Amino acid sequence: MRYERFLADNARLDGGRTALVAGGKRLTYAELDDLSDRLAAGLAAAGVRRGDRVLVFMDNCWEAAVSIFAALKAGAIFAVINASTKTDKFAYILANCTPSAILTQAKIAPVALEACAATGRMPFIAATAGRGALPEGTASFAALLETRGAPPAHGGIDVDLAMLIYTSGSTGRPKGVMMTHRNMDAASESITGLLDNRPDDVILSVLPLAFNYGLYQLLMAVRVGATLVLEKSFAFPQAVFQRMREENVTGFPLVPTISAIILQMRDVEPGFLPSLRYITNTAATLPPAHIARLRTLFPQARIFSMYGLTESKRCTFLPPEELDRRPDSVGIAIPNTEVFVVDGEGKPVPPGVVGELVVRGPHVMQGYWGNEEATAQMLRPGPNPWERLLHTGDLFRADEDGFLYFIARKDDIIKTRGEKVAPKEVEAVLLAHPGIGDAVVFGVPDPVLGHAIGAMIVRSDPALTANDVARHCAARLEDFMVPKTIEFRAELPKTDTGKVSRRLAAETMEPAE
Amino acid sequence: MTQIVKERVRAFIVENFLFGDASQAPADDESLIENDVVDSTGVLELVAFIEDGFNLSMADGDIVPANLDTLERIAAFVSARAAAAVAAE
């Protein structure tokens, strides 16, 4: 079934139920359905056709949720792009997936417009209003919502692509993970099932919609007819908790950085969020100390430790009743999927032996948009001629009962604030600075971020300061990719064979104050 | 007092979150969060700076937009705390 059907069905079943609360706006299922119908008609009138790509370049606002469903109703493929994406990367994504429309917000529209100018592509662009006038070259998003008429009869079916999710690639260039409607249906069915999501759930998410874990909070809420409360950030935890009490929030998805912030709070009392029914964690393993504290603070909530990657949405979960016995495990395969730990030849290894995790199931992606080489590395032939298995690049071991433990990445991807960062992407930006001769980027363990981005740099301009470097990066990279610690060296640490070593750089970095 | 607080906090924000680029410094009444100057881990750094720099302690309940989301609100919060401390002596 195509994913937008869940929205239409819930609007018909109980249209008065609240679907979304975001930035002071409340939308019922009927309203979300109607607004996305109108926007879909507007997109079709602007030339968007079945199979076209539509970029949703917005932060966590209600318009983003409307845009996502409107793109699907127009028969198009949506991609939510992180609102802090800078021009160069945006231009790369434009050239990669050649969208026919971009839906954005006035405050960040200039990034999209500059990227369009740089690539010589001019798709249809609509922006929500900011404080002033709409930027030149953009249509009014509000006016599109006034479009009359039904969404187009595009003829799309559920094996069509529904979305691209751009994720950091180890080569330093983002890759667009391709998911069909069926992929999304399978993943959300599995996860809403294990979480026992119900129409009376109220899920609060501070995670960006551009991040698949954040995006699925919307997709899963709409699937079951629940309410999603969308927040832009966790900057003010007490304000978020206040909102959680007002809305009687039952589900709270976390990444370890959020739980680290909660752990630093001084005045929270156990049971202060009495309506909370469950907490999920993914992106990086939750340290056992975090789990213990969360259990004290939220005694009535079930805690689900999970593991996943964009390429298959979610892979494993630890049943909450196993938390005491195996707090550091990320559990077993999610329902209706399989995982195995394999050796270098793809053969399953016995319990206790470390190998690569391989994933099988209807949630596995179709590949990367326009990147067959990277697709072939991740998706390999499976036991049947019609399927491919996902080779995650993550090293795991299983215990005697089949529960999985994350060991490390096979490549050098850094996880910071739950987001993946390819060191090469940051290095490419550093090396583009005329005052930098050489640079190496690596992860530095950090109690809140998981890993912070560290950079060791050989200057060619002796006057270059760490602030100059950070400023240069901040103008070109998403916020979470900007190095937190920068150290200048006469030369970079090398292995015996003369190769620059990220590991040695990380080990010899001066500790931060 | 308010003006001094504002300038010290502004200098901290420029140095730590804008990497020295004063041209991007937020206006007194501009939201630090909405304008992506400060994020969730940035707020922790900002709180640590205010606690150390002005010798006060912030409860979790103080870490809210009403006290911290603009330079003006930060200055008002710190000044009110300082006045309360003087009055208590």
Image (tube, grey):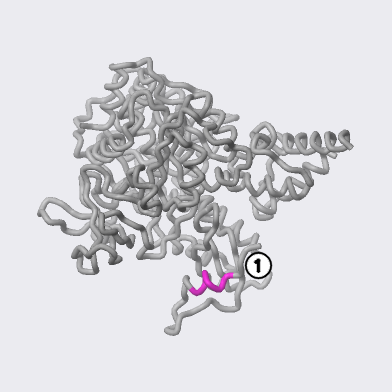
Is A505 covered by the magenta stretch?
yes
Report the residue at 48% width, 79% height from top: A494
Q: Is residue A50 above or below residue A394?
A: above
The one nearer the camera, A305 or A504, is A305
Q: Is the magenta stretch mostly helix, strand or loop?
A: helix
The one nearer the camera, A197 or B17, is A197
Q: Is residue A390 above or below residue A428?
A: above
Q: In the image, what residue type sits under mark 1?
A: Leu
Say if residue A46 shows up in the picture.
no
Q: Which residue position is annotated with label 1?
A: A464
The one nearer the camera, A460 or A382, is A382
The percent coordinates of residue A353 (x first, y second) are 28, 66
Say if residue B8 shows up in the picture.
yes
Q: Report the span colored magenta.
A: A504-509
Q: 10 Å neighbourhood of mark 1: few (<14), some, or many (≥20)? A: some
Q: In which chain is the residue bearing label 1?
A: A
Report the residue at 10% width, 54% height from top: A385
Q: In this view, does A349 lie above or below A274?
A: below
The percent coordinates of residue B60 (x first, y second) are 64, 38
Quadrant that contains the N terminus of chain A: top left
- Left or right: where does residue B3 sit relative to residue A275? right
Quadrant that contains the C terminus of chain A: bottom right
Report the residue at 30% width, 38% height from top: A191
